Amino acid sequence: MIALRKLAAAQLLEAWEHGQGQSPSYRALALLVAACDEPPELQASLSIGQRDARLLALRELTFGPQLVSVASCPACGAQLELTFSTGDICAQAPDGVTEVTLVADGYTLRARLPNSLDLDALARCADRATARTQLVARCVLEASYAGKPLPAVDLPEALLALLAAQMTEADPQADVRLAMNCPDCDHGWQASFDIVSFFWSELEAWVQQTLRDVHTLAWAYGWHEADILALSPWRRRYYLEMVRG
């Protein structure tokens, strides 16, 4: 995986600003583009799992390895807090895999793994059925039955389910699930974990606190935002403590 650099406070704020009002895929790419020198179009073509693996590494550089997630038990509604590390949800994917081939029941399919551009396009679909149809049309590169070409829209549901399972195996970081067990009712289930929304929520909270701190120090000392953001978190904290008495 390409090396990522830790983003300075000003860079994080800029990525957050660029992501306002944008889709989750755009937000993920805004962060990654700021953190490495690889062209944006190459990052946009990464599979979802490859992208999320990079985003998970960037999250560790930004806020550390520990994550705290909250979920509601689907059986009794109790709120559960789960603490884990980035290493716990880092899935090892086969190197360099961008496509999968499926041969079953006389069908042969060749498909590429979904990427951020696909998800961005699907976000504009009116419903899940339309999104699913469009995803199949975008990702299935070749399809045939008994050696004869076949339109992707004519593929049977059972075959598409097999294709989805093969894609998940080839790109495991794209579908991270946490094993949950409710201490109140003993119900167990698998909860999906989305690093994009999780990281962005953390970033939103960090931005709110950082801008409040900038306001406090600018009001107290007349400093510019860029000068305040250039301070290390430790120096900024001590100045804030002095201002607040």
Image: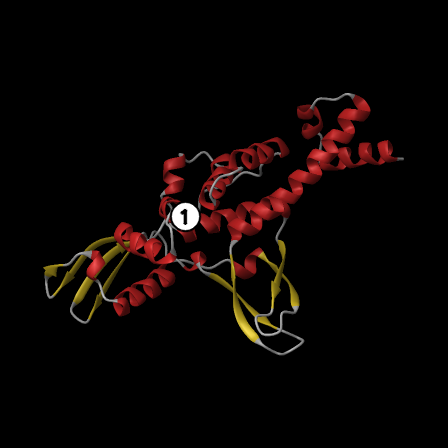
Quarter of the picture containing the C terminus is top right
In the image, residue 105 lies at what x, y percent? 19, 72
Whether residue 56 is visible here, answered yes or no, is no
In the image, residue 236 lies at what x, y percent? 76, 33
Whether residue 193 is visible here, answered yes or no, is yes
Q: Secondary structure at mark 1?
A: loop
Q: Which residue is mark 1?
A: 123
Is 30 positioned to the left or the right of 230 in the image? Answer: left
Would you place residue 26 above or below residue 129 in this image? above
Would you place residue 216 above or below residue 57 in this image? above
Image point 72% across, 37% down: which residue?
233
Residue placed furthest toward the front: 126
Nearer to me, 55 or 78: 78
In the image, residue 200 lies at what x, y percent? 56, 46
Nearer to me, 170 or 124: 124
Residue placed furthest toward the bottom: 186
Is 25 positioned to the left or the right of 185 in the image? Answer: left
Three-letter residue code for mark 1: Ala
Nearer to me, 53 or 144: 144
In the image, residue 104 lies at what x, y percent? 21, 69
Q: Quadrant of residue 146?
A: bottom left
Image point 33% across, 63% down: which residue?
164
Image point 47% across, 50% down: which residue?
52
